[in-house]
Image (spheres, rainbow, N blue to C red):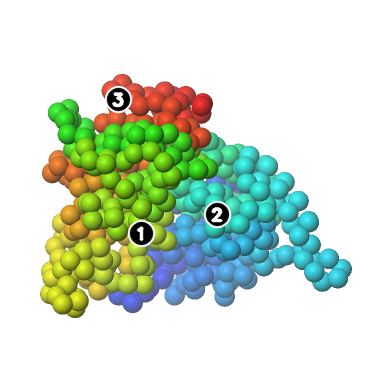
């Protein structure tokens, strides 16, 4: 850790949006060669702060110094030009371009003829990907990659820019443990190169592995800065939320009898093969495995978004063929997808439209939307799920990640779903909101619902599941009762075939 002058110094920074004071009197310093974590619940002001640093937003009050000089970047390009690179939680890569084209976007090397030097782009991108131990080709089109691999492309782009400051907003939210390890190695290299790393994550355990300092924000206010060696996990959580928070739901012994979902040797080419699993009424079953193991694809197969090529699927003992999501919805199955912003929500639509969307046709009169039902139902579920929103007409993109996730869950509960498929349900969500999601899961199963959940956080699966299936390279390698189960046992099965 260094004692040099700060590369970024912020004094009395404030920012307001209509009706909301997002930041108040923020004083922070970030030093070269340090990993400085920002911690706080969703809505605490972390993302607003890094958007001010990177030129996306302009502050309303206060002063920012960059490399000793007062500054205010007018836009993100100007900040990048001065050496500030950002990996945003909402990915900004272009899906129709290749990996190499995304890595060099806006700074493409050219030949003397003026044409793009694609050979150089691919070669340098390949070198970066190899240092990240990432099995992706520079020529791959990004839209064909998984969410986790798209995240790694974003990280590769930031690393390639030789920045003086790298800001990482939830960089491991969709990464497996192995991929997160590769990222941590990259961060250590950045530290060694005297780069300042500003790191935002809700995975508190990883902060103790990579951070030097941690600063806590709460409700837009600065709470304090500590050396990571001066505090433990419980202390950080208490500072972040202002209260003591338990981590997981209380798991109870269940008398599970009725099988609601039965998959027998289902397959989908290039994704998974001969997968068999069962889900009982009132049960929470987890699917563990490394990224690319086929976990997400199995859920999407059950939901009909990517139908099975072969095998048998049964609901309540009867064989069914689900080839479209509408078939699944009619049979009481709801999917909370891995990427809620791209696949789970209409971000530009109001909260009430998102909550009522799957149920609107059944509650229409003569093809006309029943507005009274729409308003009353959405209000009911906003209250029931404790969704923090100014009103049911608030645009969904303006909610925090945790509240957006609760809107996605609410729409399936209103639709009367008996089976919920949850893909990374707490990705990018703070510890307080996680607890609320866990409690919703518990109440759903207590009332007779069943849940099949995919998560890259093994501790999470161990905390909430009754049983855990493990996948590796498209195959089931084990089914484990969650009694005295360890992360090591799961990882052993997840890394062999």
Q: Secondary structure at mark 3?
A: strand
Q: Is residue 15 visible?
A: yes
Q: Which mark is residue 344?
A: 1
Q: Which mark is residue 481?
A: 3
228 to 7, vertically: above or below: above
Mark 3 to mark 1 CA distance (whole Å) = 31 Å
Give residue 120's position: percent from left, percent from top: 78, 56
Q: Is residue 132 left or right of residue 62?
A: right
Name the mark nearer the viewer: 2 or 1.
Answer: 2
Where is the N terminus found, in terms of image quarters?
top right
Q: Residue at x 38, y 57 (%)?
A: 340
Give residue 316's position: percent from left, percent from top: 20, 40
Q: Secondary structure at mark 1?
A: helix
Decide which of tag 3 and tag 1 comes sooner along the chain.
1
Q: Is residue 460 visible?
A: no
191 to 53, vertically: above or below: above
Q: Is residue 255 left or right of residue 302?
A: left
Residue under label 2: 144
Q: Quadrant of residue 191?
A: top right
Q: Is residue 6 left or right of residue 467?
A: right
Q: Residue at x 76, y 60 (%)?
A: 118
Give residue 458's position: percent from left, percent from top: 39, 34
Number of numbered markers: 3
Looking at this rendering, what residue extends furthest in the top direction? 484
- CB of mark 3 within 8 Å of CB of mark 2? no
């Amino acid at each position: 850790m260094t004692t040099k002058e700060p590369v970024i110094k912020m004094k009395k920074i404030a920012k307001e949006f209509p009706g909301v004071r997002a930041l108040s009197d923020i004083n922070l310093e970030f030093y070269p060669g340090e990993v400085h974590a920002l911690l706080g619940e969703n809505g605490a002001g972390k993302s607003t702060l890094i958007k001010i640093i990177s030129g996306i937003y302009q502050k309303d009050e206060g002063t920012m110094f960059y490399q000793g000089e007062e500054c205010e970047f007018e836009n993100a390009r100007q900040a990048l030009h001065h050496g500030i690179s950002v990996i945003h939680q909402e990915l900004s890569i272009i899906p129709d371009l290749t990996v190499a084209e995304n890595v060099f976007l806006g700074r493409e090397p050219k030949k003397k003829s003026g044409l793009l030097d694609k050979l150089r782009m691919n070669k340098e991108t390949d070198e970066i990907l190899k240092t990240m131990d990432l099995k992706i080709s520079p020529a791959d089109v990004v839209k064909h990659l998984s969410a986790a691999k798209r995240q790694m492309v974003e990280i590769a782009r930031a690393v390639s820019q030789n920045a003086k400051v790298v800001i990482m907003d939830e960089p491991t939210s969709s990464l497996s443990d192995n991929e997160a390890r590769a990222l941590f190695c990259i961060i250590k290299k950045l530290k060694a190169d005297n780069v300042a790393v500003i790191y935002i994550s809700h995975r508190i355990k990883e902060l103790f592995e990579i951070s030097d300092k941690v600063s806590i924000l709460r409700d837009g206010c600065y709470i304090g800065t500590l050396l990571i060696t001066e505090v433990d996990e419980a202390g950080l959580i208490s500072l972040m939320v202002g209260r003591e928070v338990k981590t997981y739901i209380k798991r109870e012994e269940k008398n599970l009898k009725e099988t609601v979902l039965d998959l027998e040797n289902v397959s989908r080419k290039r994704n998974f093969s001969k997968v068999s699993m069962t889900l009982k009424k009132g049960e929470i079953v987890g699917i563990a495995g490394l990224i690319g193991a086929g976990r997400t694809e199995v859920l999407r197969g059950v939901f009909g978004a990517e139908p099975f090529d072969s095998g048998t699927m049964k609901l309540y003992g009867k064989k069914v063929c689900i080839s479209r999501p509408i078939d699944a919805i009619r049979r009481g199955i709801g999917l909370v997808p891995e990427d809620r912003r791209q696949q789970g929500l209409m971000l530009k639509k109001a909260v009430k439209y998102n909550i009522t969307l799957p149920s609107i046709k059944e509650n229409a009169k003569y093809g006309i939307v029943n507005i009274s039902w729409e308003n009353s139902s959405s209000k009911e579920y906003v209250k029931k799920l404790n969704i923090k929103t100014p009103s049911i007409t608030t645009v969904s993109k303006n909610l925090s990640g945790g509240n957006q996730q609760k809107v996605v869950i609410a729409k399936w509960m209103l639709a009367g779903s008996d089976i919920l498929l949850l893909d990374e349900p707490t990705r990018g969500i703070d510890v307080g909101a996680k607890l609320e999601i866990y409690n919703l899961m518990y109440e759903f199963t207590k009332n007779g619902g069943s849940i099949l959940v995919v998560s890259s956080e093994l501790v999470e699966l161990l905390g909430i599941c009754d049983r855990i299936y493990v996948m590796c390279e498209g195959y089931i390698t084990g089914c484990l009762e969650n009694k005295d189960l360890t992360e090591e046992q799961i990882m052993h099965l997840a890394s062999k075939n």
